[in-house]
Amino acid sequence: MVVVCLDGSADEYLDAALARGRMPNLHRLSVEGYRGMARGAMPSFTNVNNSSIITGAPPSVHGIGGNFFYDRTSSQEVMMNSSRFLRCETLLAAASRAGRRIGVVTAKEKLRDILSAGLDFVGESGPISFSSEKAREAKLATHGWDNAETLVGAVTPAIYSGEASLYVLRAGVAMLRQGRADLLYLSTTDFIQHKYAPDTSGALDFYEGIDQELGHLLALGAVLGITADHGMNAKQNSDGTPKVVYVESQLTEHFGSGFRVILPITDPYVVHHGALGSFAVVHLPESFSDPSRVAAFLTDLPGVTEVHAQAHAARLFELPVDRLGDFVVLSNRDTVLGRTPQHHDLTAIEGGLRSHGGRYEEMVPFLRSERLNPVYAQRATGDVRNFDIFEFTMNGGLESVLK
């Protein structure tokens, strides 16, 4: 069983590659198995959705509501790239205890600790978990393998490349060939999707490479489940410049100082997105007496589509209320939300901004390499979530009905 999260893979990327004959293995999988759509967790960011996929639960359960949040108790902006922020067990840890041989490979090192939560690296027969970004640095005691380059048979790739994602899939292929894992989670990175639109040669070449590795996994007898953490859209003006609403600047100019805007997309990989996404969290000054004025003001800003107070946002988006601010703000399909112009280095995204985080990147592909049994075929007609992918992959086959 192999579950793949193709980071940033809006369905348009698969459609474009399939239409040009660049993904024959995915085409066969779609015909012989199941291809549909699923609703991801909100905000549509990497840490949020990967955490949901490996726990089978929304952020209100597992606790990861973004890449960053403001911790009011410590008065610090905190990056949620550690398993200590998880509030429930992962499916991978439970499966490992039940005797499955677990293999986890992620492109970005920032995810590895979360994905490895609860795994006991007991030596050469235990689980394996590493990132393609730091493959060379893997250790037996902490990753289940010394220097993962020796497992994959290739040097550690640059994180800002398509190779970082292909390396993830090649590692999965190597584990299956060597009999080192029988339940794998492979999570790629969205550098290509941030850089290229679906119908460009850069994207098409990349998805052709993805398809080749999917073919290798299928040839090894794997049952594949494939989804994405979020989609991707262009967020720019007609001249190619980023289309940004600087929320903190707008609030300060209109109401005065003391506002704090948290952008949950923020992570170390600024070349991808410049810390600009379509979801923002607003913390009001402690002395502010009329929050309704702020809500009305934000709602009227061009490009803003939704403004929700804390409690309502937590219910609507299934988010941990204690890691939210006073308001949640979302923008439209082609607009991102920023803090202040000084906070963002736009030179990192001079080639044009493609990003995610809002409603318009919430729907993602959802595939299984073999046909669904009647129970899961019926479920697939309803509100399928991307974090149902492990359940559909493992229990959705005809053999499950026979048992």
Image: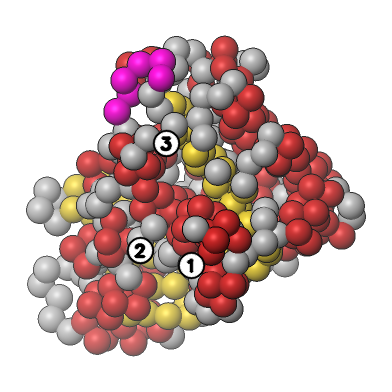
Say whether residue 49 is left or right of residue 168: left
Q: Over which residues does the magenta segment extend?
A: 120-125
In the image, residue 204 sits, relative to residue 110, either above or below, namely below
- Looking at the picture, which amino acid does disc 3 mark? Arg
Residue 195 position in % (x across, y down): 68, 47
Residue 275 position in % (x across, y down): 46, 50
State the residue position of label 1: 385
- Looking at the picture, which amino acid does disc 2 mark? Pro
Q: Coloured how?
A: secondary structure
State the residue position of label 2: 58
Name the N-terminal-most of marks 2 and 1.
Answer: 2
Residue 173 position in % (x across, y down): 64, 30
Q: Are marks 2 and 1 in contact (CB under 8 Å)?
A: yes
Magenta-span inclusion, residue 121 = yes
State the residue position of label 3: 100
Q: Secondary structure at mark 1?
A: loop
Name the N-terminal-most of marks 3 and 2.
Answer: 2
* In-front residue for pair 15/326: 15
- Looking at the picture, which amino acid does disc 1 mark? Arg
Considering every residue shown, the one lying at the far right of the view is 20
How much space separates mark 2 and mark 1, taking CA atoms?
9 Å
